[in-house]
């Protein structure tokens, strides 16, 4: 079933920041970077649960999509059906955050 896609303010800020970092002062390259991520999310929306669930997360509705050198973190919600984009970060930052969350406190 097609999901409504909702972007958090954090995810929008992340997309802007990563596009700037990836493409610098080239507006066409920034637009291409952002459009590539948006295209992946268009593909994802009809089948959000086929993507990787976050390890060490007790709630299986939290997922991650690996895209190039970035990871897109999202939550699949049932009622109403929607996919909430929570954050986008470079793989190195995502790996560090996942390792930290897996460490015993």
Image (cartoon, rainbow, N blue to C red):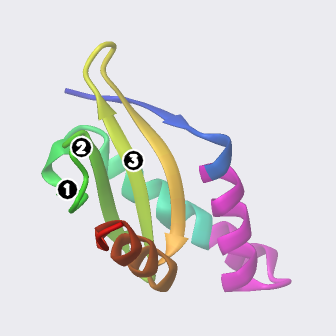
**What residue span does the magenta drawing correspond to?**
11-32
Residue under label 3: 74
Q: x, y (%) of residue 64?
A: 32, 59
Residue 8 is tagged as: none
Q: Secondary structure at mark 1?
A: loop
Secondary structure category for the residue under label 3:
strand
Residue 16: where, in percent of width, then height?
A: 72, 62
Q: Are marks 1 and 3 in contact (CB under 8 Å)?
A: no
Q: Looking at the rendering, in which quadrant would you find the C terminus?
A: bottom left
Residue located farthest toward the left when viewing the structure as drawn = 50
17 sits left or right of 102 in the view: right
2 or 3: mark nearer the eye: 3
| For the residues bearing labels 1 and 2, Cβ distance under 8 angstroms | yes
Rendered image: mark on residue 48: 2
Q: Main secondary structure of the magenta part?
A: helix
Task: Answer with left or right where residue 51 lies relative to residue 63.
Answer: left
The outermost residue toward the top is 80
Q: Are marks 2 and 3 in contact (CB under 8 Å)?
A: yes
For marks 1 and 2, give the CA distance.
6 Å
Q: Residue at x 22, y 60 (%)?
A: 56
Q: What percent of the width, then of the height, locates residue 18?
A: 65, 73
Q: Is residue 42 above or below residue 40?
A: above
Q: Earlier in the sequence, mark 2 or mark 3?
A: 2
């Amino acid at each position: 079933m097609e999901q409504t896609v909702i972007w958090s303010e954090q995810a929008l800020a992340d997309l802007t920041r990563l596009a700037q970092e990836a493409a610098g002062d080239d507006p066409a390259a920034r637009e291409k970077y952002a459009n590539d991520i948006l295209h992946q999310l268009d593909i994802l929306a009809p089948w959000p649960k086929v993507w990787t669930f976050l390890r060490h997360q007790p709630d299986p509705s939290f997922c991650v999509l690996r895209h190039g050198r970035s990871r897109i973190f999202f939550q699949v919600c049932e009622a109403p059906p929607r996919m909430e984009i929570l954050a986008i970060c470079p793989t190195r930052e995502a790996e560090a955050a996942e390792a930290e969350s897996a460490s015993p406190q």
